[in-house]
Image (cartoon, grey):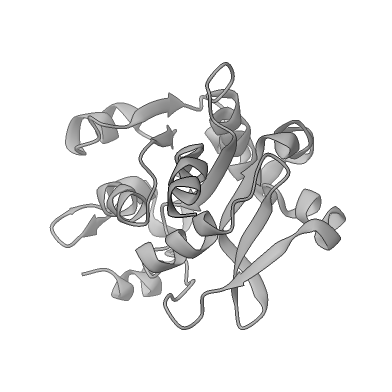
Amino acid sequence: MTTRKTTDEAAAVALLLAAGGGRRLGGRPKALLPHRGRPLVEHAVRILREGGCTRVHVVLGARSDEVRARAELADCVLVDNPAWEQGMGTSLRAGLESLAGSDARAALVSLVDQPGIGPEAVARVLGAYTGEESLVSAAYDGVRGHPVLFGAAHWAGVAATATGDRGARAYLREHAPALTLVECADVARPFDIDTEADLAHLE
C-alpha cells in the first residue's frame, strides 16, 4: 500500500503560480518579497518539496528576469507567462501547458503569496490523489482554498475556463460534486499577501 501511494504521488507535478506584480504592494512582485531572508518564491518552493512534490514548475511573470537572477530555483522548471498582467487565469493556463507531453498525471496548484500554508497541507492534498480523475482541494473550516490538485482528465476543462483573476474557480464550482475537500485548518492559515498591511505576516 505504501509503495502504491509513493508511485501515485510521484505522478503529480506542483504548479507554483508566482507571476503577480503586486499592484497593491506598490508594484513589488510577490515572488521577490523578502521572507526569512530570501525571496518568497524560494519559501513556496521549499514548502511544496517538503510536502512531497518532487517536481515543481514555477510560473513567472512580473520582472521575471530579476526573479531568475535573485531566487535559487535551479531544480525547478521555470515557465514564463508573458500575459501575466491579464490575471491569474493566464498563469494557470501557462502552467498546465508546461505539462504537455510529460508523464505528469496530476497538477497540484499553489500560490506564491500564501506563506501560511505549510507542507502538512500540501501532503494532505497530495495524499488524496487517486488517479487522473482526481479533483482535490484543501479546505479551511469547510471553505475551499489552496492547494488544489487537478488530475490530468480535468486539465483541458480548467484551461478553457481559466480567465482573469478567477483561475479555476468556475470549473471547481461546476464540478463541486466531484471535488474532494481535505480539511487543513488545523495545520495551515490561508491568508494572502495582497496589501501593505499583509506584509506583517512575512518575517
The answer to whether residue 172 is visible is yes
Q: From the viewer's side, name the closer residue of 49 and 36.
A: 49
The answer to whether residue 118 is visible is no
Determine the residue positioned at 49% across, 64% down: 124
Q: Position of residue 145 (x, y in %)?
A: 60, 66
Across the whole image, how many numbered discs are drawn on residues?
0
Determine the residue positioned at 76% across, 54% down: 172
The picture quadrant where one finds residue 60 is top left
Quadrant in which the C terminus appears: bottom left
Q: Position of residue 160 (x, y in %)?
A: 78, 33
Q: From the viewer's side, name the closer residue of 3 and 201.
A: 3
Q: Position of residue 113 (x, y in %)?
A: 42, 58
Determine the residue positioned at 74% across, 39% down: 154
Q: Position of residue 110 (x, y in %)?
A: 49, 51
Seen in the picture, residue 24 relative to 171 is either above or below; the reply is below
Q: From the viewer's side, name the closer residue of 159 and 175.
A: 175
Q: Is 175 displayed left or right of 9 in the figure?
A: right
Q: Is 188 displayed left or right of 99 in the figure?
A: left
Q: Is 185 displayed left or right of 67 in the figure?
A: right
Determine the residue positioned at 53% across, 47% down: 108
- In the orientation shown, which residue stands out farthest toward the left? 37
